[in-house]
Amino acid sequence: MRFPMVSIAGVVCAAGLLVAGVPAQGQSGSPEKKNSKAPGDVTRGKTQFKGNCVICHFETSDKKKVGPGLKGFGARTTFADGTKITDARIHDVIVNGGKDMPPFLGIVNDGQIRDLISYLKTL
């Protein structure tokens, strides 16, 4: 039996997204409380960083790449613009973007952001 290549490619892509833990287009992933205070998972956060952030941010250097280097981020108290670093502010920057940062709304969910924030605090 012959299968169209598009269907096979679609199945392979969907399977890859499921294995990677990324919700397929049009899905929001597992239901989560928007204002949940549950701590994130550092290991999953590092995976999120490698998949979404490392292209623009160094994690082991404070030198600018496209965005600022994040070495020592966990010890910082303010962003470059002087605003206080809080989990809520980090969440806002990730979701809505910043001066030179694109928004990640719809790309990462709240749980993934909590994981990422937990990882950023280790840098």
Image (spheres, rainbow, N blue to C red):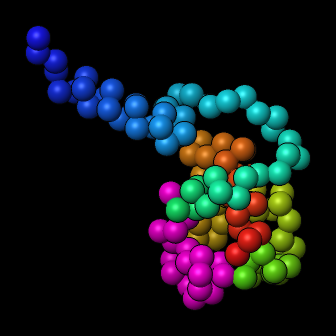
Left or right of 122 on screen, residue 57: left
Residue 110 is at least partly visible in this image: yes
List the single residue furthest toward the front.
Answer: 43
Q: Is residue 22 above or below residue 96?
A: above
Q: Position of residue 46 (x, y in %)?
A: 61, 61
Is 115 inside the magenta-drawn segment?
no
Viewed as shown, does residue 76 lie left or right of 52? right
Q: Position of residue 111 (x, y in %)?
A: 72, 44
Q: Position of residue 34 (x, y in %)?
A: 81, 38
State the residue in front, 55 or 122.
122
- Count of numbered marks: 0
| Nearer-the-camera pick, 43 or 118 | 43
Q: Residue furthest top?
A: 1
- The residue range painted magenta reads 51-71
Kindly report the secondary structure that dominates the magenta region of the rendered protein. Answer: loop
The answer to which quarter of the image holds residue 43 is bottom right
| Residue at 64% from the left image edge and 52% from the top image edge | 44
Q: Nearer the viewer, residue 88 or 61?
A: 61
Question: In the rendering, at what x and y percent does residue 40 appear?
Answer: 76, 52
Residue 93 visible in the snapshot: no
Q: Residue at x 70, y 58 (%)?
A: 42
View extreme (bottom): residue: 63
Q: Residue at x 16, y 21 (%)?
A: 4
Relative vertical location of residue 39 with respect to residue 54 in this rendering, above or below: above
The quarter of the image holding the C terminus is: bottom right
